[in-house]
Image (cartoon, grey):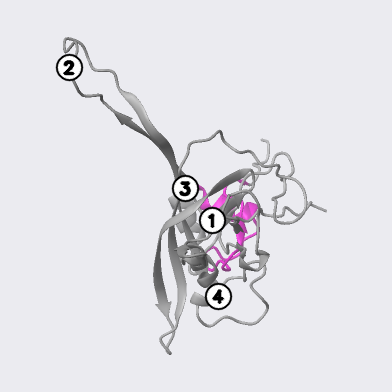
Amino acid sequence: MAETVRLAKAELRQLDADFRNEINRENWTVVQFNPETLKVSFANQIATPTGAGDQSGTPARQFVGAGTTKLSLQLWFDVNAPLPEGGGTQPVDDVRKLTQKVAFFITPQQEGNKFVPPAVRFLWGSFQFDGLMDSLEESLEFFSSEGKPLRASMMLNLSQQKITRFTFRPTSGPPGTGVTPPRGTSPLTQALAGATLQGLATLQGQGNNWQSIAAANGIENPRLLQPGQLIDMQARVARPLL
């Protein structure tokens, strides 16, 4: 019997004001669909000194301040897909009931005499990013007859006022830390509501191979994928030897 591969899910966790300890577990949230990409950008504050001096050469530039690191990603939520971990068991009729836990991290909280957004830790497998949420953009789609949004995409931008060495988290351990897949397996693709196998294959430059991918994954109807269905887009049906 084939071993079941547990898909590591990305998480948002609240940190204390010193960005050291994870706090308030009730505010943590597991994403419904993992992001397709993570964009990390780095910037240093560089300035060219002014004043008299030798102007014959190129003026030396100086590091004048702390660097910054930014993380950008997109998340999707769909009421017709399986609920994320900790999302309860009751049916959800408004996608904002799922996205509100992400919006928590952009909402300023009172600390003494000031209001600041909660410190947040983004985790996904071996990747970790600690910072503050600078901006959050939510797009609501597919409204019900009652005017309730059923699907949403969220663009997150996080930043930290420093540049540090990469953090590599262990990818084996208890739930929530990610699980190392068996050797030889490849990352799985999650299908959103309304997605087709042909469309997914085309997006990944494999439009000519969708039939073999369908057969290798045991998909009978490539035009009717279940929301949240996991597909190995690298799988192929072995051709018989001649």
First reached walking from the N terminus: tag 2 or tag 1: 2
Q: Amino acid at mark 2?
A: Ala
Give the foreground label among 1 and 4.
1
- Which residue is the site of mark 3? 204
Give residue 224's quadrant in the image: bottom right
**Is label 1 in a helix, a strand or a loop?**
strand
User: The disc labelled 3 sits on which kind of residue?
Assistant: Gln
How far apart are the alpha carbons under marks 1 and 3? 35 Å
The residue that mark 2 highlights is 52
Q: State the residue position of label 4.
A: 80
Would you identify the image quadrant in which residue 134 lies?
bottom left
Q: State the image coordinates of residue 173 (x, y, percent, origin top left).
A: 77, 49
Viewed as shown, does residue 134 lie left or right of 3? left
User: Where is residue 171 drawn, in percent x and y?
Assistant: 70, 44
As helix, strand or loop, the secondary structure at mark 3 comes to loop
User: For the residue carrying disc 4, how many other residues have a C-alpha within 10 Å: few (<14), some (14-19), or many (20+)?
Assistant: some
Task: Give how far across and how far down residue 188 sits, in percent.
Answer: 61, 51
**Residue for badge 1:** 119
Q: Is residue 223 visible?
A: no
Magenta stretch, residue numbers: 209-236
- Residue type at mark 4 is Asn
